[in-house]
Image (spheres, helix red, strand yellow):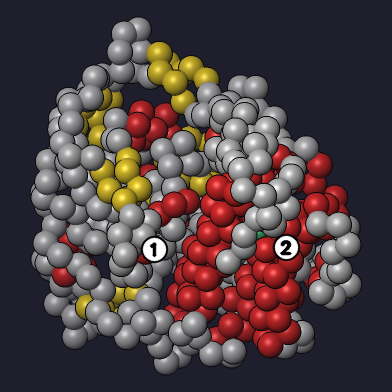
């Protein structure tokens, strides 16, 4: 635990140095511990596997998240900082070309050296140095901003650890489970619709401009600045599309009907021989003839109940779009999604068992929202279930946060007035603004303190290894 030497020195942020340092130290320790907790069930051999081009070995994630704090915070802001190892500066760089050369991504599975013990020692070395940095009562504002970025960066990699190890264990011929318990499923709820009427003349605010005097008020640069868009009235499904619903699409020859597919999707689907979502496998002993690999191992897909009522996930944009077309619907735009999500008021509710669960406020009627929003707890990383749940039967929108990322129809571009961060950190988001599509809402492996209504995730449209699903939308 870090303490400051000054009791109540005011700094330009408006916080006292003690309270700010304590808050940063507490969050830092919590984020770093959560990463190690995700790796705890794994063997050193598990942590070496890199089973698809999108994924990285868990061991690499442990090192790279540490590299981020060392590179962007300790080297710049801790006087006299001694790097743990001179080679680590380039070895664990992910994609920051401004910082120099780095190993090709596909070689990360070759890092049998340095050994895991050295990576864990690296983490301890950097953790100790960050504690020393946070003891400085005059911590520069830029250091505070980068700490906040470091937290969010490590949480992104926590989600990647869960999704990468899922793919790694799935590709193992033994198909071992990450966690041996059964996934929590629950009884689902019928599909219904909520219509949203943006106030006349249909201009709504999208995105966020963080308060300039609060360096802890974090948003990624790609969520900024706040701006106005024109948004006609629209209708959203009350919940995510389920496995049972997607099975009907599969059984209706959805994967062989060209009229349902975008041209690039048709090519990808045929080239990759997709015939069902990733992790669905034919299994004659199952009532539907299918079983689904989860972080709990393979589970049969029944006709009703169990996994049938849980959200379908590990879909590409193309599969999500084809399903929506088959339903006579469409995917929502990211602006429709954000307007709907902003109608939910979010509390971060602290409990001893789930310290950062998101809980929606009790039922409330918001202007422009046609239905009540109900109190519900989101299924995110902290529930520990690691698989989407069936939707609650409560009225109003369900599963806006957690369970599965929701593909939108919006391409990933900068908002009007967008400015990347200065320096090498400008490579964090901005350089990926081509040929990618926005997803919203987080998944069952997204940390709850990481998500917000303005959060913009993005992937190439053929991506399937993340927990990616869909919510139907339609015009009114
Ligand atoms: Fe990273």
Q: Position of residue 56 (x, y in %)?
A: 62, 71
Find out if the beta carbon at label 1 lies less than 8 Å from the nearest ligand 1 atom: no
Q: Position of residue 425 (x, y in %)?
A: 74, 46
Q: CA distance from mark 2 to mark 1?
A: 30 Å
Q: Residue furthest top?
A: 201
Q: Position of residue 332 (x, y in %)?
A: 36, 35
How many numbered discs, if any?
2
Q: Position of residue 18 (x, y in %)?
A: 60, 49
Query: Is 332 above or below relative to 63?
Result: above
Find out if the beta carbon at label 2 lies less than 8 Å from the nearest ligand 1 atom: no
Q: Could you classify mark 1 by the number of other residues whose Cα lies within 10 Å: few (under 14), some (14-19), or many (20 or more)? A: many
Q: Is residue 285 left or right of residue 474?
A: left
Q: Nearer the viewer, residue 279 or 165?
A: 165
Residue occupied by mark 2 = 132
Query: Is 111 above or below relative to 62?
Result: below
Q: Is residue 364 left or right of residue 458?
A: left
Is residue 236 visible in this depiction of the protein? yes
Name the residue at 32% across, 85% down: 180
Which label sits on residue 454? none
- Asked whether the beta carbons under mark 2 and mark 1 sit within 8 Å of each other, the answer is no
Is residue 313 visible in this depiction of the protein? no
Residue occupied by mark 1 = 381
Query: Is 474 above or below relative to 70?
Result: above
């Amino acid at each position: 635990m870090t303490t400051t030497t000054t009791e109540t020195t005011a700094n330009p942020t408006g916080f006292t140095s003690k309270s700010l340092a304590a808050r940063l130290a507490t969050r830092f320790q919590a984020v770093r511990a959560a990463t190690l907790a995700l790796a705890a069930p794994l063997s050193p051999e598990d942590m070496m596997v890199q089973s698809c081009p999108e994924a990285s070995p868990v061991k690499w994630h442990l090192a790279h998240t540490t590299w981020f704090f060392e590179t962007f915070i300790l080297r710049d802001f801790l006087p006299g900082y001694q790097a743990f190892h001179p080679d680590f500066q380039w070895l664990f760089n992910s994609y920051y070309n401004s910082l120099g050369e780095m190993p090709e991504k596909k070689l990360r599975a070759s890092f049998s050296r340095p050994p895991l013990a050295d990576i864990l020692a690296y983490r301890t070395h950097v953790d100790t140095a960050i504690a020393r940095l946070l003891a400085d009562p005059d911590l520069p504002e830029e250091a505070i901003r980068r700490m906040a970025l470091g937290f969010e960066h490590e949480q992104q990699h926590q989600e990647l650890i869960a999704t990468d190890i899922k793919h790694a264990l799935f590709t193992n011929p033994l198909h071992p489970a990450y966690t041996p318990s059964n996934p929590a499923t629950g009884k689902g709820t019928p599909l219904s619709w909520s219509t949203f009427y943006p106030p006349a003349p249909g201009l709504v605010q999208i995105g966020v401009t963080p308060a300039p005097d609060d360096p802890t008020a974090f948003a990624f640069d790609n969520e900024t600045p706040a701006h106005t868009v024109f948004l006609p009235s629209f209708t959203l499904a009350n919940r995510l599309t389920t496995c049972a619903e997607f099975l009907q699409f599969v059984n209706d020859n959805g994967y062989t009907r060209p009229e349902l597919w975008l041209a690039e999707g048709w090519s990808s689907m045929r080239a990759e021989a997709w015939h069902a979502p990733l992790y669905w496998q034919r299994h004659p002993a199952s009532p539907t003839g299918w079983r689904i690999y989860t972080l709990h191992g393979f589970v049969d897909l029944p006709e009703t109940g169990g996994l049938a009522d849980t959200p379908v996930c590990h879909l590409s944009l193309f599969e999500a779009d084809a399903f929506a077309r088959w339903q006579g619907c469409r995917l929502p735009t990211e602006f429709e999604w954000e307007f709907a999500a902003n109608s939910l008021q979010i509390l971060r509710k602290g409990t001893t068992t789930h310290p950062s669960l998101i809980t929606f406020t009790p039922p409330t009627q918001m202007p422009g929202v046609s239905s009540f929003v109900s109190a519900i707890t989101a299924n995110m990383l902290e529930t520990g279930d690691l698989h989407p749940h069936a939707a609650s039967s409560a009225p109003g929108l369900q599963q806006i946060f957690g369970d599965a990322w929701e593909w939108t129809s919006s391409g990933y571009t900068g908002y009007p007035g967008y400015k990347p961060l200065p320096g090498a950190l400008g490579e964090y988001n901005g350089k990926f603004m081509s040929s990618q599509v926005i997803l919203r809402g987080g998944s069952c492996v997204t940390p709850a303190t990481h998500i917000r209504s303005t959060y913009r995730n993005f992937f190439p449209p053929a991506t399937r290894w993340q927990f990616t699903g869909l919510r139907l939308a339609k015009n009114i």
